[in-house]
């Protein structure tokens, strides 16, 4: 008889735990699913998220503050100055080393380097983790136009200076000839 009561107790415990489990399942059965179909859909990312860097290249003055602030030297910059204009050669960030500490962002005087919200650094070859942050090589279009205009003005000034020097030389030569002619008549 004891084994018979134990049998019914086991049946009752089984039904009870099944009903408890089904009640939990029932709560979530009618709710909207929260599954995100990555990469087609993405969860919202907080504003302060430290993702892949992006550079506002037009603002950058190549002061090297971000490279000096980086504790592991993963930022390399190279640009050539033409007066106030910059001709960009490279601005690379090595994500094999980067620890996403955001220390490169704060010292920038022009606020041109930022931590983005992109986080997918999936590559097959580790050499692809050395990212070039430049959106263009060389000079920006408007900088190129300003440089051409400045070179034109400089060339015009030099041409005017040369023409003036030639006119002065011609005037001196004419004056010298006039003096020779006046001296020869006397």
Image: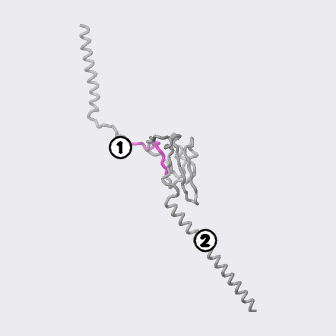
**Residue 4 marker:** none
What residue did someone put label 1 on? Answer: 40
Q: Is residue 43 left or right of residue 72?
A: left
Give, as a single range, the part of the protein colored magenta. 39-55
Residue 62 magenta: no
Question: Residue at 37% of width from left, 42% of height from top?
Answer: 39
Question: Residue at 34% of width from left, 40% of height from top?
Answer: 37
Coordinates of residue 4 in the picture (x, y in percent): 24, 10
Q: Residues within 10 Å of mark 1 (few under 14, many from 20)?
A: few
Secondary structure at badge 2 equals: helix
The answer to whether one can see residue 100 in this image is no
Coordinates of residue 101 in the picture (x, y in percent): 51, 41
Which residue is situated farthest in the front direction here?
125
Disc on the earlier residue, 2 or 1: 1
* Quadrant in the picture for residue 156: bottom right
Secondary structure at badge 1 equals: loop
Q: Is residue 41 left or right of residue 8?
A: right
Nearest the viewer among 144 and 12 is: 144
Coordinates of residue 180 in the picture (x, y in percent): 73, 87
Which residue is situated farthest in the right direction here?
186
What residue did someone put label 2 on? Answer: 158
Question: Residue at 69% of width from left, 82% of height from top?
Answer: 173
Coordinates of residue 174 in the picture (x, y in percent): 68, 84
């Amino acid at each position: 008889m004891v084994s018979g009561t134990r049998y019914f107790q086991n049946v009752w415990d089984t039904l009870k735990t099944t009903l408890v489990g089904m009640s939990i399942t029932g709560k979530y059965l009618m709710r909207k699913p929260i599954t995100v179909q990555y990469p087609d859909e993405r969860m919202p990312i907080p504003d302060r998220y430290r993702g892949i860097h992006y550079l506002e290249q037009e603002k950058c003055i190549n002061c090297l503050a971000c490279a000096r602030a980086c504790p592991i030297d993963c930022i390399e910059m190279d640009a050539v100055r033409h007066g106030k204009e910059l001709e960009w050669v490279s601005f690379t960030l090595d994500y094999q080393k980067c620890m996403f500490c955001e220390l490169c962002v704060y010292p920038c005087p022009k606020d041109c380097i930022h931590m983005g919200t992109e986080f997918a650094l999936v590559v097959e070859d580790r050499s692809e983790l050395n990212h070039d942050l430049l959106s263009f090589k060389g000079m920006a279009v408007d900088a190129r136009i300003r440089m051409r205009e400045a070179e034109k003005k400089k060339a015009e000034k030099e041409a005017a200076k040369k023409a003036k020097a030639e006119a002065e030389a011609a005037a001196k030569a004419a004056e010298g000839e006039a003096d020779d002619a006046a001296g020869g008549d006397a």
